[in-house]
Image: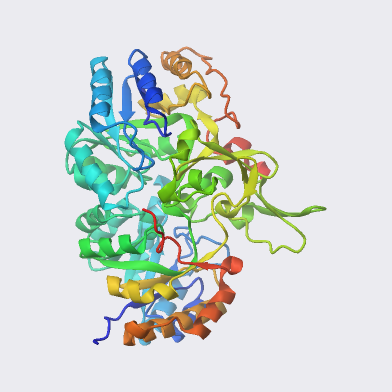
Amino acid sequence: MPEQPRVELVCPAGTLPALHAAVDNGADAVYLGLRDGLNARNFPGLNFSLADARRGIEYAHERHARVFVALNVYPQPNRWPAATAAVDAAAGAGADAVILADPGLLAYAAERHPGLNRHLSVQASASNWRALEFYQQRFGVRRAVLPRVLSLAQVRRVIERVSMEIEVFGFGSLCIMVEGRCALSAHVTGESPNTHGVCSPAHAVRWQERPTGRQARLSGVLIDEFAPHEPAGYPTLCKGRFEALGALMHALEEPASLSVLELLPQLLAAGVSAIKVEGRQRSPAYVAQVTRALRVALDSCRRDPGNYRPPAACGAALERLAEGRTHTLGAYNRPWQ
Amino acid sequence: MKLSVGPLLYHWSRPQVFAFYRELASQPVDCVYLGEVVCSKRRELGRAEWAAIARELTAAGKEVIVSTLALMEAESELAALARIVADAVTIEANDMAAVQLAGGRPFVIGPHLNVYNGKTLRLLAALGARRWVAPLELDPAAVGALLAERPEGLESEVFAYGRMPLAFSARCFSARVRRRNKDDCGFVCGEDHDGLTLYTREREPLFALNGIQVQSAQVRNLIGVVDALRHSGVEIVRLSPHSPAAVPFTAVIEAFAAAIGGEGGAQCPPSALPGGYCSGLLRAERGSGSA
């Protein structure tokens, strides 16, 4: 049986050491954000200065890995000059692609830097082939990252219908809402992925010890309370425990992570061009471990998809890293439409 | 300044829907948006019945626009969209698929398209957009900043009354909280005529669940800033339908009509929904001191 075409493993880097970790452990491409508040992981202490970005790109290129620069917030008029300057800077630094969501910024990049690859960010929430066709025809988008709401059957159908490359999320935190269509964090904290590149930002979090347990608040709003021996998760809004119909529950989302290890043969057969790992906010050690595990899994799946089994060691390594210690296949395996 | 009534976001019964639009025909609103924005499984009324409602409203002098689905995944949803684009005079596009299909014909940029800068506004206007409904997370000041960069002839509309649509998911929350699967939902969202309120563990109303959509528990009510909106260049204010159990909707229309007509101090009747009124996002409401 012929080998499947090479599928790119795209790994996150919030810092230069994380970029080194990704490249050294087998990433085909690394994505990063500049320190300008214009990408979807706008966290304190994270992201690259332009000088570090240049160094990272050089390091990656010497080892035959590519670097994508994420610029995936939606700039408002006051940030527009900074956003276009960031596209120029990414192009000047030798990035292999920019990952954009904003139509205006896509148009700008296409006009000013026609030779620079444009990838459509998951934040553009293009969840069907007609929308993808729009971005491809208008802005010459070469690759699109699909929202984490599609089932495997829907991913397959999208790939049949479009001629652009399709990248899907393979591992990491799971957004239950359609990316780019969620203003929950804006409502409670005033800052959201679309406007500020953050969700439930750390500066809005406050922990309070109470006799009943540990309370997690976001801008004063109680997101959850954890009993003394209960593991306390980060108070991301959609992962809070709320009351509905008189019952307390994870009304929106159970804390869990996405892992497609089991689905790799189907995803490769569907024709995805790249598997993406979430987590630019993660440590270099995490990035190293996840990259290595997915590299092993992808290589073994490509060599012999028919006999592929998720490598046991690989699964265990990833299990330890999962949020809430539970993995799900996200929406990929949902039976419903 | 004009008054519009946005698409019905909830899953009401046929009699409720017919009664709502029959009453609306005689109300002082200029524009009515019809169509399903939230869930493609909701089909209480057939195409012919919606067309009849559209004809009645048009005959009553209203501009009728058909809003399209916000989250489009299935092939069947794209096919339904193609039919709407073929039928409707004007659509409100809530996904880029609708912009792609509307192809050069006049359309309205719905609140679920991410438009945050002048460059994006101009490129959509060049593709046929003639009106822009601002995203919910832009406050009136941010809308004003963007309007300073809008192309000539593009109207602007702001969501001024109703529980705010905040997020969409592939998951149905109305079914989930009732421990049902989405494919066997039994249309339980129909039990919540104004969404199902979600409370924090301190009983603070925070969100409202409406099928695959999450809304604010609070009802945004911008009646106090209608003049400011006008000054920043907004031409149309949108009222989002609510059931009689929440508020007498015709009284809301009257109050906004009075405010637009220049009557200072016009007030909406109180909302019976948990959470009451807010002037926008919770954060803005409470100020920065609450963190």
- How many tags in the picture? 0
The answer, for residue B246, to whether it is visible in the render is yes
Q: Is residue A325 left or right of residue B143?
A: right
Question: In the rendered view, how is the structure colored?
Answer: rainbow
Up-down relation of residue B154 to residue B202 (above or below): above
Quarter-of-image position of residue B50 = top left
For the view shown, which residue lies furthest in the right direction? A211
Asked if residue A133 is positioned above or below residue B257 in the image, the reply reads below
Q: Position of residue A225 (x, y in %)?
A: 71, 53
Residue B41 spot, x, y in % from top left: 35, 42
A204 on left or right of B163: right
The residue depicted at 32 percent of the width and 78 percent of the height is: A7
- Of B66 and B115, which appears nearest the observer? B66
Give the percent coordinates (x, y) of residue A330: 45, 62
Residue A90, position as x, y percentages in the image: 36, 67
Quadrant position of the N terminus of chain A in the picture = bottom left
Q: Return the residue nearer the eye: A105 or A119.
A: A119
Left or right: A106 in relation to A72: left
Is B163 situated above or below A205?
A: above
Residue nearer the viewer, B46 or B129: B46
Report whether residue B128 is seen: no
Report the front residue among A68 and B90.
B90
